[in-house]
Image: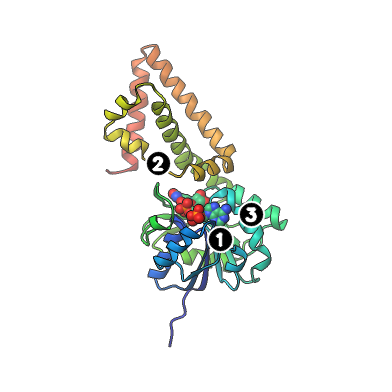
Amino acid sequence: MTKQVLIPRLCVIGVGLIGGSLARALREAGEVGEVVGSGRGEENLRAALRLGVVDRYELDPARAVVDADVVVIAVPLGAIEPVLRAIAPYLKPTTVVTDVGSAKGDVVADVERIYGHVPANFVPGHPIAGTERSGVEASFATLFQGRRVILTPLAETAASAHHLIKRMWEQTGAEVVDMGVRHHDAVLAATSHLPHMLAYTLVDTLARLDDRAEIFRYAAGGFRDFSRIASSDPKMWHDICIANREQLLEMISLFSADLTRLAEAIRSDDRAAILATFQRAKRARDNLYLD
Ligand code: NAP
């Protein structure tokens, strides 16, 4: 007797780092039947086929979703609305649709604009895992192992759809947690989106100094650690800034005020304030990680 897999036909639109890694992980877990890929350019999809990440691909997303049990939208945030619009008339009523976008309020607004409401079989999601690389070649099956995936189901979301997407992510070795849409966006603005803004701005500021070659020559491990995420895909992060504008601006204001306060303490030789800031930060960082 053949084993009943969790998802007989999976369609991944955007077979990049996240979409490709999810497809690979589900294949390794033996919980997917056929994987159909779709995306923007044929080159990446051809690579996905060659690497065995997908069984076939369709450039037209409307053709790719036909008879899919689950559709995962893993394109940059700015491309989610046109993709959703293109596939909406071709989904069967039982198809469960999810996404992996890094900001959730914007995706839910996209869905509401298209349908006038959030369909019961749409489950917004966000895996808290990634690297600074992109494309299917960068994808790997263990990306989500031991990591968290946040789902932000709404009151309208069907329990069966929510349960299926939860089980899908659990097959990848991830721990799945639920969160409200606004809470998700506030938490991610603080822990992920602001740090990316800081890394991009720091590297950009230094790169525009006249003696930048000299500066980068003496940059040591600390700079390498801090600046790593500035190598992330600029278009993806552009989309995240726009999508989570409100919550991100709040965090940037908070951080700017604290940085100004530190600059003032340095200017006025307020050594107690400088030391207190660093001690508070060290205590918080040490409690967070054991490395
Ligand atoms: P990626 O590696 O660049 O993959 C994105 C894929 O989407 C590419 O294969 C690309 O195709 C395709 N694509 C781009 N524009 C498209 C369009 N208009 N229509 C159809 N397909 C399109 O990016 P990723 O890192 O996997 O990110 C994908 C999503 O995951 C984003 O929404 C991001 O916010 C979210 N996310 C990323 C991370 C992370 O750390 N990277 C973590 C969590 C969530 P081509 O290759 O042909 O351009």
Q: CA distance from mark 3 to mark 1?
A: 15 Å
Of labels 3 and 1, earlier in sequence is 3
Of labels 3 and 2, earlier in sequence is 3
Q: What is the secondary structure assignment of the residue under circle 3? A: helix
Instruction: Name the outermost residue toward the top.
Output: 268
Q: What is the secondary structure assignment of the residue under circle 2? A: helix
Residue under circle 3? Answer: 82
Query: Measured from the top left, where is residue 76 in percent x and y?
Result: 53, 50
Residue under circle 1? Answer: 98
Q: CA distance from mark 1 to mark 2?
A: 27 Å
Residue under circle 2? Answer: 231
Q: Is residue 78 above or below residue 262?
A: below
Which numbered dot is residue 175?
none
Q: Residue at x 60, y 68 (%)?
A: 63
- Judge by depth and name the residue closer to the eye, 222 or 206: 206
Instruction: Name the outermost residue toward the front.
Output: 43
Query: Measured from the top left, where is residue 36 in percent x and y?
Result: 51, 68
Circle 2 residues within 10 Å: few <14, some 14–19, many ≥20: some
